[in-house]
Amino acid sequence: MISAYNHSQIIRGVLCVFGGLVCYVLAWLFFRYASSWVLDSFRFSTSWAVWIAVAALIGITISGYITWQRGQGFQSYVETSLFHDLAGSADTAGANVVDYYARQVTGPAYVLSQVFLGGPLLLLRGIRHFQQLIPNEAVLEQKLHHTLGILRKANKWQSITEYPEERREILMLAQMKQIDFSAHKGTPRFKALPPDGV
């Protein structure tokens, strides 16, 4: 049980870290060459493009970290400040036209913002997967199987206070998604279904 869980966590962690690095590379390329193009079009030296790209990546990293600390992550287009619905508030032809052209700007801006934030968010998610690895010890494996067996026999929602000696094992089983776990009503409650899921 532990080795299978750790294996899946390692795979997820590696994929998240790789995805985060890809997002950082894409952000670097965008800011490096877009800023170079803008500087060149105004006849400024393009040597500043590298520093603009570095500053942008630092800003993205800080923004991603703050987003992560708030418990947030990727957002849908409707959840962002880039979303607008002018046609819905004033159902006229003019509002529809303005809405259409505005979305040609805000749509790509939304996609880019999510790709850029993907760098820090995916890296932090990958680190979290590695932090959630469980020690692969035979004694712990036996305790987890024993506790899971007891909880499956009960086959009902229970309070964690009913099992003070097995608290650590119950939390690990919840982490491994072996039991349903809910803490939204204050006292954590859980339920372990029988192996066949009935």
Image (cartoon, grey):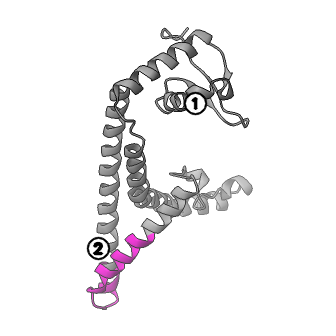
- Identify the residue at horizontal 65%, vertical 28% (top origin): 160
The part of the image, by quadrant, that contains residue 192 is top right
Instruction: Let me know if residue 104 appears in the view.
Output: yes
State whether residue 45 is above or below residue 20.
Answer: below
Q: What residue sits right under mark 2 in the picture?
A: 33
* Residue 129 belongs to the span the image colors magenta: no
Which element is circle 1 on? helix
SS majority, magenta: helix
> Is residue 140 placed above or below 97 in the rendered structure?
above
The amino acid type found where label 2 is placed reads Tyr
How far is disc 1 from disc 2 in space, using C-alphas?
Answer: 54 Å
Which residues fall within the magenta stretch?
A: 37-59
Query: Which mark is drawn over residue 133?
Result: none
- Tag on residue 167? 1
Q: Quick check: is 55 in the magenta stretch?
A: yes
Q: In the displayed structure, would residue 83 be above or below residue 172?
A: below
x and y percent of residue 196 in the render?
Answer: 49, 8
Q: In this view, does 28 lie to the left or right of 186?
A: left
Q: Hey, which quadrant is residue 25 in on the image?
A: bottom left
Position of the N terminus by quadrant: top left
Is 59 left or right of 12, judged from the image as shown?
right
